[in-house]
Each structure stands twice: as structure tokens, then as C-alpha cells.
Image (spheres, rainbow, N blue to C red):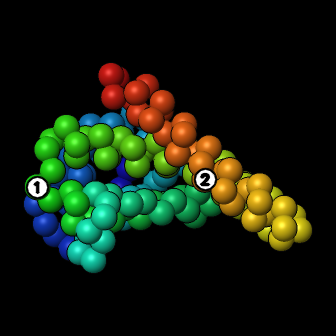
Amino acid sequence: MKYIQKKGSKELQEIRDWLIEYEDVIPKWITEIRLSYDADNRDSMLKVACHPYRRYVEMDLCAGFIGATDEDKEEAVVHEIAHMILSPISDLIGLVRDVLPSGMVDEILEKQAEKAEEFVVPDIVNIIKPL
């Protein structure tokens, strides 16, 4: 696994350390994780954008991460790993969404697929954390 830090900081190194700790459960399709800092996002701790067909992930450290407890930081990292695990399925849903008539997309996929993913993520976190 290759880690690329766009800007150096203690917090980005901390995230990298958490990711290395959980590297065994990070999907094998990921060959690179690009870490950066998003100072404008004060509502989140971390956010992730997955690119399964390009084999990399962009992970942004958000302002909410700074000053959080170690337990909350670990929970946030594992939560984003769960999104990494689900991202190929999310991408497939996106492809299906592109071929359905727009009314069906808005009503069924947009709302339900996102809700379903967030519903499953805590269960995946509970599986990963004890490992």
C-alpha cells in the first residue's frame, strides 16, 4: 500500500498510522491512499472519495478530526474503511442509475442506496474494530 500525503502534518501522519494498523482489512483493489487536509469542512472528521477502477482513494482530514479523542479518531478511520469496502457496489449502483429513467433514479436509487450504505457501515465497523 502506498500512502501519499499532499501536505505534511501530525494529524495526517496519525491517520496514516491508523490506516496501517487496519491495512489487513483495507480492500486489496486499493494500491494508493492520497491523504490531504480539508480545512473548510468543519462538520466532518474525515471524508473519503473512492476510485475502484483507478485503484486509489482520496482521504481528507477535516477540521472535526483535530481535538477529537483517540477513540473517535479510530472510529472515524474505520468508518471510512467501511466505505472503501462498499465503494465498488456504490459505483455499480451509480452505473445502474445512469441507465434508468430519471424518475426511478431520484425515487429509488439516490435516496435508498445512500441510506442502505450508511445503514450497513456501522456493522462493518463492528466487525473490523475487534480484529
Q: Secondary structure at mark 2?
A: helix
Q: Quadrant of the C terminus?
A: top left
In this rendered view, identify the residue nearer to me: 83 or 115.
115
Residue at the farthest bottom position: 40
Q: What residue sits right under mark 1 in the picture?
A: 67
Drawn side of residue 49 relative to residue 73, left or right: right
Looking at the image, residue 102 lies above or below residue 1: below
Q: Position of residue 62 (x, y in %)?
A: 27, 65
In this rendered view, identify the residue nearer to me: 67 or 8.
67
Instruction: Identify the disc placed on residue 114.
Output: 2
Q: Residue at x 60, y 53 (%)?
A: 114
In this rendered view, identify the residue nearer to me: 81 or 5.
81
Q: Residue at x 26, y 68 (%)?
A: 42
Looking at the image, residue 88 lies above or below residue 104: above
Instruction: Tell me the CA gap for discs 2 and 1.
Output: 29 Å
Question: Which amino acid type is marked by label 1?
Answer: Gly
Q: What is the crowding at mark 1: few (fewer than 14 residues within 10 Å), some, or many (at least 20)? A: few
Q: Secondary structure at mark 1?
A: loop
Q: Is residue 3 visible?
A: no
Question: Which amino acid type is marked by label 2?
Answer: Glu
Q: Position of residue 37 (x, y in %)?
A: 26, 70
Q: Quadrant of residue 24?
A: top left
- Chain-order first, disc 2 or disc 1: 1
Q: Position of residue 64 (x, y in %)?
A: 22, 60
Q: Residue at x 30, y 40 (%)?
A: 75
